[in-house]
């Protein structure tokens, strides 16, 4: 219904609007490279992707993230709870 009304699915990040589809494609590329969707806020190649992922988790927790987007992210294997341990380098033995 929102598409029919001409709703803009753009997400505004630091004054720049980035389309949802582009963010999803960025997340897919990250997953292909790293094997997971746990993008750190400190992910240097794309800091805004990490911030976007963090924002998604917060929006879901608040109940403000649309169900269709939750389903898309679930299909990707998106983790809704970010473990601090998942971004730390593993110790070599």
Image (cartoon, rainbow, N blue to C red):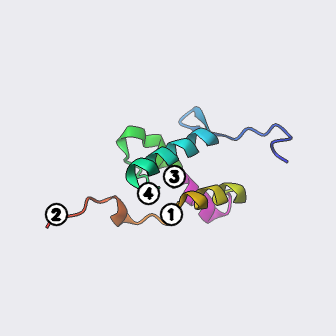
Q: Residues within 10 Å of mark 1 (few under 14, many from 20)?
A: some
Label 4 vs 3, first from the N-terminus: 4
* In contact (CB < 8 Å): disc 4 and disc 3: no
Q: Secondary structure at mark 3?
A: helix
What residue is shown with label 1? Answer: 79
Residue 38: image location, x then y, percent: 44, 57
Which mark is on residue 92? 2
Residue at the location (64% across, 59% down)? 70
Residue 86: image location, x then y, percent: 36, 63
Q: Secondary structure at mark 2?
A: loop
Q: In the image, is 79 to the left or to the right of 4? A: left
* In contact (CB < 8 Å): disc 4 and disc 2: no
Q: Nearest to the eye among marks 2 and 3: give it.
A: 2
Q: Secondary structure at mark 1?
A: loop
Residue 82 falls inside the magenta stretch: no
Considering depth in this image, is 27 or 5 the residue closer to the camera? 27
What residue is shown with label 4? Answer: 36
Location of residue 65 by image quarter: bottom right
What residue is shown with label 3? Answer: 53
């Amino acid at each position: 219904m929102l598409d029919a009304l001409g709703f803009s699915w753009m997400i505004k990040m630091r004054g720049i609007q980035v389309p949802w589809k582009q963010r999803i494609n960025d997340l897919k590329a990250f997953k292909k490279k790293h094997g997971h969707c746990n993008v750190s806020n400190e992910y240097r190649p794309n800091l805004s992707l990490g911030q976007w992922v963090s924002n998604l988790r917060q929006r879901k927790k608040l109940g403000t993230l649309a169900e269709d987007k939750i389903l898309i992210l679930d299909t990707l294997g998106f983790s809704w709870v970010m473990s601090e341990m998942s971004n730390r380098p593993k110790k070599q033995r």
